[in-house]
Image: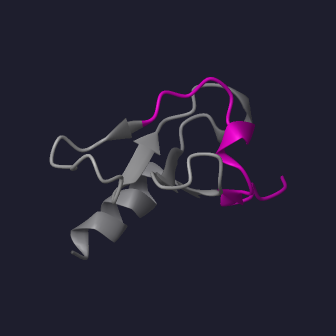
Amino acid sequence: MSALPRNVSASTELPEVRWLRSSYSTGANNCVETARPSAGPWAGLLAVRDSKDPDGPALLFSPESWAGFTAAF
């Protein structure tokens, strides 16, 4: 089994995802957005991108990794 990449060079590579941002975000686009791909090799992972660069790269986390990452804050 090959390892999946943990990022994509352009978030447009993720098929039909709905990007969400926190209700605490301001209109200045200084936040991150998250999405859960439901199809393809990234199904079940959490994608995270910079809202200032919506066509730019996205990081991919397993649910367990994301929980550990956010718990560290």
At 48% from the left and 27% from the top, the residue drawn is 18
At 47% from the left and 38% from the top, the residue drawn is 35
Q: Where 47 falls versus 35 (above or below)?
A: below
Quadrant in the rendering for residue 45: top right
Q: Main secondary structure of the magenta part?
A: loop
Image colouring: one colour
Name the spot of residue 29 as percent of width and height, x first: 36, 52
Quadrant in the rendering for residue 31: bottom left
Q: Locate residue 59 relative to residue 30 in the image: left or right.
A: right
Extreme residue toward the front, this view: 28
11 in magenta: yes
Extreme residue toward the bottom, this view: 72
Extreme residue toward the left, this view: 24
Name the spot of residue 7 as percent of width and height, x first: 67, 59
Name the spot of residue 60 as percent of width and height, x first: 57, 55
Q: Locate residue 40 relative to residue 54 in the image: left or right.
A: right
At 48% from the left and 53% from the top, the residue drawn is 48
| Count of marks placed on residues | 0
Quadrant in the rendering for residue 38: top right
Q: Where 63 falls versus 5 (above or below)?
A: above
Q: Which stretch appears magenta?
A: 1-19
Which corner quadrant holds the C terminus? bottom left
Residue 50 vs residue 29, the one in the foreground: 29
5 in magenta: yes
At 25% from the left and 76% from the top, the residue drawn is 72
Name the spot of residue 32 as percent of width and height, x first: 39, 55
